[in-house]
Image (tube, rainbow, N blue to C red):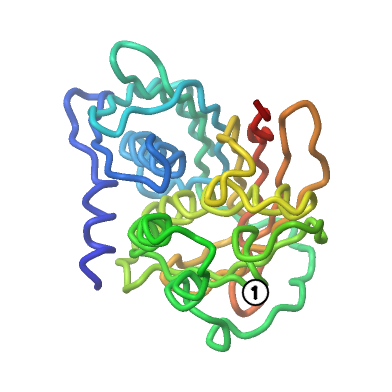
Amino acid sequence: MSQALQSLLDLLDLEQIEENIFRGRSRSAVVPRVFGGQVAAQALVAAGRTVPSDRLAHSLHAYFLRMGDPGAPIVYNVDRIRDGASFTTRRVVAVQHGKPIFGLSASFQTYEDGLDHQAPMPAAPDPATLPTSQERLRGYDHLDADVVERFLEAREAIDLRYVDEPPYGKFGEPREPHSQVWFRTNGKLDDDPLLHVVLATYVSDMTLLDSVLLAHGRGGWAVGDVVGASLDHAMWFHRPFRADEWLLYDQESPSAYGGRGLGQARIYTQDGRLAISVIQEGVVRVPRQH
């Protein structure tokens, strides 16, 4: 396991303060605030710590309420909404400086047999044939060196490979609002199913709004032609998967309007199983010209 991945796992390993209260810390992000994927992943850890191990996370719905302060701890308060025969529901509120910054509802289910069908996996190149994040980013002369280093540091624990040029790599002309990314952790994980779901949640917030930017030929915050932030985030975990094995993140944007953009995606295992569905809306604003 890489040191970067171990540091990420340590970041997600919350301190339990009371029966339903947990405390997490933050680290530097690509932008000067707490990374949304970190808060969502930590909140899911907090919820999962109050659920029997035979109940697996199958969905989460979350709202980003305030910008997080990376220099302060985050307290996660878990509300045990329901413990049913098959399903368990938890609500988590993340608090900083006495105010809620994030809210999450998550549902867990015991395993059962049932109907089974899925949308087919789209075509995508083998991830081994694609450039790594470091190879791509170090080839962009138009990006500030500081931006490149912050990207690489934020993604050091994750092997993330774009199928095509990311928004900040090629911009100025609209492209199809569709993006594909392969990802896996930079190292093996243990077999705890919650850990793999938590790591996928962490990564899911990294690139989902890229397709909004592509539709308008925007490069994103890295080149200063938009400002934005996540507003809400939903995930459904359909089938077992491992976050330390290649996953295809197939993303698209059906709409942008009113300063908001919507991204939706499906995440497939390399052998074609639909593992996760994701939807996110975010603020996507063009800076005003003065």
| Figure quadrant of the N terminus | bottom left
The residue where tag 1 is placed is 163
| Figure quadrant of the C terminus | top right
Image: 159 above or below 176: below
- Image location of residue 97, percent across then percent down: 28, 15
Q: In the figure, residue 177 lies in which quadrant?
A: bottom right
Q: Residue furthest bottom?
A: 129
Q: Nearer the viewer, residue 213 or 124?
A: 213
Q: Mark 1: which secondary structure?
A: loop
- Image location of residue 217, percent across then percent down: 75, 54
Q: In the figure, residue 50 lies in which quadrant?
A: top left
Disc 1 crowd rating (10 Å Cα; few below 14, some 14-19, many 20+) is some
Query: Which residue does the image show at 47% across and 71% down from the upper left?
Result: 133
Q: In the figure, residue 28 lies in which quadrant?
A: top left
Residue 1 located left or right of residue 206: left
Query: Which residue does the image show at 41% across and 70% down from the upper left?
Result: 244
Query: Which residue does the image show at 35% across and 39% down from the upper left?
Result: 42
Residue 178 located left or right of residue 235: right
Mark 1: which amino acid?
Answer: Val
Q: Nearer the viewer, residue 49 or 73?
A: 73
- Image location of residue 186, percent across then percent down: 35, 72
